[in-house]
Image: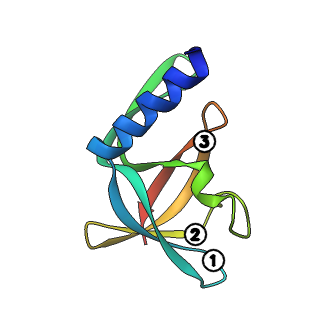
Amino acid sequence: MGWEGRARRLQRASKKNFYECVEYTKAGGSSFTLMAKFDESFLMIEDRGEVAVETRKPVATVDLADFENRTPKEPKRDDLIRARGVLYKIHSVQPDDGRQAVLILKKA
């Protein structure tokens, strides 16, 4: 088994153990459920020149494959996610390796 196969197996195991069901609503209004790794207090370090700023923000990691049969085919800024009973708006989308994206959230 090559590197790609191992990465997919690890991703499936991670999804099974650490992801939870969230409701995703597109800015146009259609919604669907998907699995996401949700973290209410993700530590982000932003380098602003000579000073680094630490902030904690809610994030959701999603598999981009869950968007392949949808329009648009990727998560977008201002779409909504309901996780653990709280509604969040997507502030930014940060794709990683082409298979997942980290969604930086803020309460809606």
Quarter in which the N terminus is drawn: top right
- Vertical relation: 101 (above or below) 51: below
* Residue at the spot 69% in from the left edge and 65% down from the top edge: 69
Q: Name the residue under label 2.
A: 79
Left or right, 6 with respect to 36, comes to right
Pick whichever, 13 or 72, lies toward us: 13
How far apart are the alpha carbons under marks 1 and 2?
Answer: 5 Å
The mark nearer the N terminus, 1 or 2, is: 1
Q: Disc 1, disc 2: CB below 8 Å?
A: yes
Q: Splitting the image into 4 quarters, where does residue 97 fall?
A: top right
Callout 2, which amino acid?
Asp
Callout 1, which amino acid?
Ala
Of all residues, the one furthest to the right in this rendering is 72
- Which dot marks residue 94? 3
Q: Mark 1 points at which residue?
A: 27
Callout 3, which amino acid?
Gln
- Vertical relation: 81 (above or below) 8: below
The mark nearer the N terminus, 3 or 1, is: 1
Image coordinates of residue 24 in percent, x first then y, are 49, 70
Pick whichever, 92 or 49, lies toward us: 92
How many numbered discs? 3
- Which dot marks residue 106? none
Element assignment for label 3: strand
Element assignment for label 2: loop
Determine crowd level at label 1: few under 14, some 14-19, many 20+ residues with C-alpha closer than 10 A: few
How far apart are the alpha carbons under marks 3 and 1?
Answer: 18 Å
Q: Splitting the image into 4 quarters, where does residue 85 fall?
A: bottom left
Element assignment for label 1: loop
Quarter in which the C terminus is drawn: bottom left
* Residue at the spot 57% in from the left edge and 43% down from the top edge: 101
